[in-house]
Image (cartoon, rainbow, N blue to C red):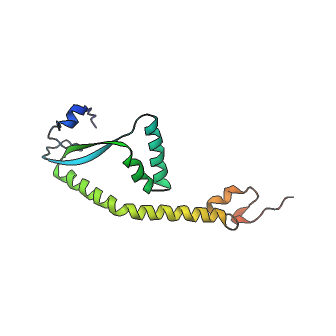
Amino acid sequence: MANVHVTSYEIERDRFPPVCVRCGAAAEDRAVQSLYIVDGWWGAFQLLGLLFGVFFFPPLIRIVTRYTRSVSVRLPYCPPHHAELDRGERLGKRLFPIWTTAALVADGLTIADCLTGPPIGVCLTCSPKLGPGGMRVSDP
């Protein structure tokens, strides 16, 4: 895969060659995409927020991306890759609420498991005096 470095001058003036950014085939269509710029200490903080959002609280991803610096770019795509890009965006918009619900339910179940009754599952490692199946191990 080839690497191409573009300058802000090329981005601002739409100076991309008419080849697909994915495969290199001839491309006439251009799709507008947002490129997020994450750099410096603030970028490291944003990256940690994104990672936390992926696993524990997905709405945090939208909050973090709202406050990152971004650039809108018109990138050339061949027709098959342009259609694939459109399908991916539609699928992402449909799956985000499902993913958010699943993550929040899993978080809630884990917290409820840790707070109630004898710890089982994930919280089994919280108490060293528990044996297999959550049974209390008596001291000799």
Q: Tell me how many marks there are.
A: 0
Q: Nearer the viewer, residue 24 or 12?
A: 12
Q: Quadrant of residue 59?
A: bottom left
Does 15 appear above or below 122? above
Identify the residue at image location x=61%, y=65%: 112
Identify the residue at image location x=58%, y=62%: 110
Q: Nearer the viewer, residue 43 or 121?
A: 43
Does 9 appear above or below 127? above
Task: Tell me if I can see residue 134 in this picture.
Answer: yes
Does 38 appear above or below 133? above
Residue 34: give x, y in percent of width and height: 29, 46
Horizontally, residue 31 falls left or right of residue 54, namely: left
Identify the residue at image location x=15%, y=37%: 17
Q: Quadrant of residue 109?
A: bottom right
Horizontally, residue 104 falls left or right of residue 34, namely: right
Residue 54: give x, y in percent of width and height: 45, 53
Residue 46: give x, y in percent of width and height: 44, 43
Q: Quadrant of the N terminus?
A: top left
Q: Quadrant of the C terminus?
A: bottom right
Horizontally, residue 37 falls left or right of residue 11, namely: right
